[in-house]
Amino acid sequence: MSASIRARKPIGVFDSGLGGLSIIREVRKILPRESIAYFGDLAHLPYGIKSTEQIRQFSLQNADFLVRLGVKLLVVACNSSSSAAFKWLQRRVPVPVVDVIQPVVREAAKVTRTGRIAVIGTSATIESGAYPRALLELNRRFQITVQPCPLFVPLVEEGWRHDRIAESVVKKYLIPVKNKRPDVLILGCTHYPLLKPMIRKVLGPGIRLLDAVKPATEEIKSTLIRLGLQTGQRGDGKMHIYLSDRPRNFIRVGEQFLGEKLTHVHQVHLS
Ligand code: DGL
């Protein structure tokens, strides 16, 4: 296939559910001509409490589906998948792969003044040790605090982001983190950017909150440029959403993540 035909193919993005749409929102802003095929593995949600083996198996199924659709680049928009399966997937799929951990880790290393960096994520992400590994590869002197926050995803999905329940849950997880005096906190999960106002309220102004949305989108853009895969098409790119189970509250919550109406939504069965 010629490079210009390949460049017209969509970018493939997958997540366990809808959180990865926050990355799509930024991609649509920065790369409006690119078409997107998004796969949300609702049938196997949540990934954040599953084993590495399970997450790898699901991630490979998702990647295979998108590769069969003909995507030119694969984005692992889920932190739990990125931590369990990024390098493993790179060896198994025939297209370039971008994850959500490496880009934000590089950003954290750039902006920290004290070298004290905290990371929050799902249990799977934190237990994998992927963030400390990636951070320490950049600087062995970083002091890293990690904290799983398993109740954050259901809070966001219930829409309880601004009330007293959210505040006490955020306090319970993050006051011990604050006591370690980090100057950067990495929000290592697709859903956590939606809790930013509450996290900011609990932690106060002194800690910089970083999430993957902007760094990962920059990484997608620079990878496309580096490989000559930017689309030459005129006009806005299309977006198709594929889900492995019925949408339930996907549309309502998904539109909050995406900031636009969800239109082409298809339910598919992977076997
Ligand atoms: N997408 C997941 C992540 O970023 C959160 C939801 C889940 O546990 O599946 O880790």
Image (tube, rainbow, N blue to C red):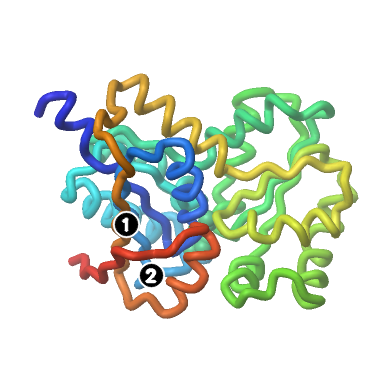
Q: Position of residue 215 (x, y in %)?
A: 56, 35
Specify which label sits upstream in the sequence, 1 or 2.
2
What numbered label is drawn on residue 42?
Answer: 2
Q: Which corner quadrant of the image does residue 58 belong to? A: bottom left
Instruction: Calculate the distance from the C-alpha at mark 1 to the C-alpha at mark 2.
Output: 15 Å
- Pointers 1 and 2 in contact (C-beta within 8 Å): no
Q: Quadrant of the C terminus?
A: bottom left
Q: Is residue 2 above or below residue 186?
A: above
Number of other residues with Cα within 10 Å of mark 2, as a class: few under 14, some 14 to 19, many 20 or more: many
Residue at the (53%, 60%) spot, across then down:
257
Q: Nearer the viewer, mark 1 or mark 2?
A: 2
What numbered label is drawn on residue 248?
Answer: none
Q: Position of residue 228 (x, y in %)?
A: 28, 21
- The kind of secondary structure element at disc 1 is helix
Looking at the picture, tell me which residue is in the foreground, 107 or 197: 197
- Residue assigned mark 1: 57
Residue 8 visible here: yes
Q: Which corner quadrant of the image does residue 99 belong to? A: top left
Looking at the picture, tell me which residue is in the foreground, 128 or 34: 34
Amino acid beneath label 2: Leu
Residue at the (27%, 35%) spot, across then down:
234
Q: Quadrant of the N terminus?
A: top left
Residue at the (47%, 68%) spot, across then down:
46
